[in-house]
Image: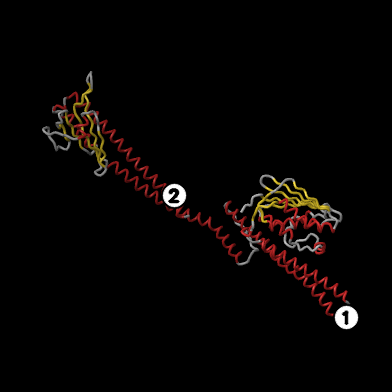
Amino acid sequence: MLFAFIVIGVIPLYLFTHILLNSYMDKAVGNKFTQMQNQIIMLSNQMLPTGYLTLADVPEIGAEVNRIADVYQGRIVIVNNNLNIVEDTYGLYDANKYLVSKEVIQCFSGNSSRVHDKENNYLILTQPITHTTEDQKVIVGAIVMNASTKDIQTILSTMEQRAIIFSLALAMFIVIFALYFSGKLTNPLTKVVSSIDHLTEGYMDEEVSIKGYYEIEKISDSFNKMINRMKKIEDTRQEFVSNVSHELKTPITSIKVLADSLLMQEDIPVELYREFLVDITEEIERENKIINDLLSLVKLNKTAGDMNISSININELLEQILKRLRPIAKKQNIEVIYESFRPVIAEVDEVKISLAISNLIENAIKYNTPDGWVRVSLNADHKYLFIKVSDSGIGIPEEVQDLIFERFYRVDKARSRETGGTGLGLAITRNVIQMHRGAIRVYSKEGEGTTFNVRIPLNYIA
């Protein structure tokens, strides 16, 4: 983060400074060329009327040329149309010499040239001297003017020094700000890490309360939700273990009591033996059912990779389930009604989905009233299949409807044991439906019956 702040702060500053200095250099050089050109035009206007270019001795013009050369700390060379050197402020050439260069030759074609010699810090401007007549413009000579750029370089160096000082000061400020800001930002995260460490050590009673940035507060809230969820899971686990222990121990206790009663008595009639053995057999069957349901629940808690998906005719599947359960309903004189609105083919795990639907219908039969009814309906749209299981039974109190899918939860524990329930059926059903990426809802009113609505995708989503 510190590095990021430095990069974000210093690099744009460096680029801005570099662009600013280059812009100043280009602007200053352009302005100086313009000034030099104005001076050359002024000299040209003074030379033409005096005949200075025909080697006439005009002290005033010569003095003006030398003055301008001194002002610009440079050199001025003047040639006529024969390329004879008329004036050289350095005195290196006399009137018998010629100045032949690419720039001078181009002047007589009407083109001026500008050269910036950055290594030697001077400018060279070659400008034609033009005489205007009534008919046309005639080039009668050329002026080559050199000017020093030391003044520009001096100002540029000063600006560079100030830019460096400013950049260093700003970089120091950025570093200090980055250290402060990163510390302020990471301190709450350190608290979260500390809380996570406490959580991994088994302390789940601590909650994190961090005030500051909105995002950090959201992390704090999410962490607290996670802790509360873990507490709930831990409570559920402990309750599950307690319930499993109790449910498995109860039949064994009954068996032991019955067996001890037989052992403590002598010369017991055969009928009493038979009665006690029937009771023992029922308790063993109850124990076996609890264990089987527990094994089913454990298997359903595995990953979806254990799903054996195939295209199944749901209509035929429901008819098979109802055919198996109708004898149970007939014993209680309960009418079972099946409604199918259309043929339904879906990608499901046949064994698991049969178990889930069987649990719903079997519960509807078990917890019904004498001479009641159970209605099972099947429908579908382009995406889902819908199964509804309704009954005229005892109903479920509204305050416990959110708990009925928990393992070992029973609305009426006494009645559940009488009917052979283990409290795992609806937990198994919900797990199966969730493994198929479906949903289950319950609607019930105490004393008026219960309706379970199941929705499952027609095409399995892995």
Specify the amino acid type for callout 1: Asp
Q: Which mark is residue 51?
A: none
Q: Earlier in the sequence, mark 2 or mark 1?
A: 2
Say whether residue 126 is left or right of residue 57. Answer: right
- Foreground of the two, 436 or 25: 436
> Where, by quadrant of the figure, is residue 110 drawn?
top left
Q: Hey, what amino acid is under mark 2?
A: Gly
Which residue is farthest top?
A: 134
Which residue is at a point 17% across and 24% down the rendered structure image? 50
Left or right of residue 347: residue 372: right
Marks 2,1: beta carbons within 8 A: no
In what element is the residue under mark 2? helix
Badge 2 is on which residue? 9
- Answer few, some or many: residues within 10 Å of disc 1's Cα (few below 14, many 20 plus, some between 14 and 19): few
- Identified at 60% across, 53% down, the residue is 218
- Residue 287 to residue 395: above or below: below
What residue is disc 1 on?
267
